[in-house]
Amino acid sequence: MSTMEGFEGLLEQGEALAEEGLLEDALSRFEQALALEPDNPEVIEAIGRTLLGLNRPEEAEASFLDALELDPDWVAPRMGLAALAMRGDEPFKVVHHLERATSSDPEYPDAFVELGRYYGLMGEPGLARATFERWTKAHPEDADMLINAGLTAFDAADFAQALDFFERALENAQDDQQKSGARTFRANSLDMLGRYPDAVGEYERVIRYAPDWWEAHANLGICHARNDHHEEAERAFRRGLKDCPGSPEIRDELAAHLLTENKNLKEALSLAEEAVALGQDEIRHLYTLGEVRLALGDEEGSVEAYRKVLDLDPEDPNAHLELGLYHERRGEVERAEEHFVEALKQDPGNPRALYSYASLYYATDDLETAEELLVRAVAADAGYSPALSALASVRARRGDYDASLDFMEKAVAAGERDAEHFEQALEFAPLHNHPRFRTLLARMSASDKRGNEAR
């Protein structure tokens, strides 16, 4: 066997093992291939990719840089370095490497997709659009790129621009999958633009021609629910389950809908469990399972679901938040704090996490720290009523009753309806005969009554 045959064989084995997720074995084959051809950039880049998958970023970076030194115009090492920079939250490096990749190989679509999407994540929709259009001007028939451009604009809440991209994608779609995707995403944009009947018609058109396209069923149900047509939403999800019996996504959406409507929770639990069984690596299915279990009073089962989320993503902020709340309810303050801190590391502006963390300090009479966290929560979401109500409590405990009433009024305007809390909490006792306080209590009671009647 020649050296070339041995090298190529080891390289092919490594790639096959990497595709199967056997990264340690893949790395071993690549290293054996490298011993045969130490200056081959292809195997050096493959080693970098594998090290990246094994979460060994420093070694991965060294491999990508070595490959790039041997072949400065090769796109693959650039993409690897961009992926590393994304992990390290280094936006300037991400943009640098992706821009260089698009310049080095103007015919490599993945670089344009990643760069356009990243500009969208950075809150630069103009740059995102310009990136996609650099490609589509040269390849106006590329429906996939137009769909990616539309999705990026949609995520940036530029729904009119998204609609334009999806319509252009539909004009250039070459196969049924592209057509169904473009139509479904076009319908999403129509819905967000307030064109509910048009959106429903477009979803129905997709379903008529491709009944097994689960995305259309799921988004039709979501569209109905968003527009307060809840019975139609349930019918859409159930039709989707009939047409797409193997879809974990439809099960998840129907379970979440039943949970929101507070009906058939046992069926919702069964659906959520099936969704997790069918799509075990989908974190959102585990979220729904955790929420349904908690609604049924199975707190331990709910916690189990969120712990499985952390098995998949140890940094997931929402799972940390839910586990923090669990430990707080059990009086395990230190463990609750650990999870709240982890949640805020990943999502520092999450008002619910800030409010929950503040509650730990409020309970220990550290009103100053509690207020700092609550102010951050309100800065992140001026209409987050739990934080506004808590600030009213903090100010009342400090004897600053005018400020307390101001926060209370903002909380009521934001939807606070728990009049009983304000009547019974000791810090508000000095305000019981205050006209403004009595008026706010009456507004909360009236709002609560209207809400109950609407159910």
Image: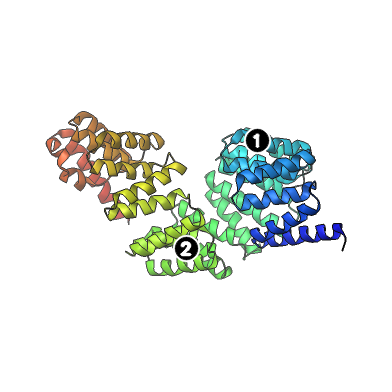
Query: Does residue 110 appear in this view?
Result: yes
Q: Position of residue 262 (x, y in %)?
A: 36, 61
Please provide percent x and percent y for residue 454: 32, 54
Left or right relative to 179: residue 327: left
- Residue 414 location (% of width, % of height): 33, 40
> SS class of the residue under badge 1?
helix
In the picture, the disc for residue 186 is none
Task: Identify which amino acid the numbered label 2 is placed on.
Answer: Leu
Front position in the image: 298 or 127: 298
Task: Identify the residue at image location x=34%, y=37%.
Answer: 373
Where is mark 2, residue-wise? Answer: 254
Q: Nearer the viewer, residue 370 or 385?
A: 370
Q: Residue at x 31, y 48 (%)?
A: 334
Q: Quadrant of the C terminus?
A: bottom left
Closest to the observer, 446 or 384: 384
Q: Residue furthest front?
A: 35
Name the residue tied to disc 1: 95
Residue type at tag 1: Val
The disc, 2 or 1, on the residue closer to the chain's N-terminal end is: 1
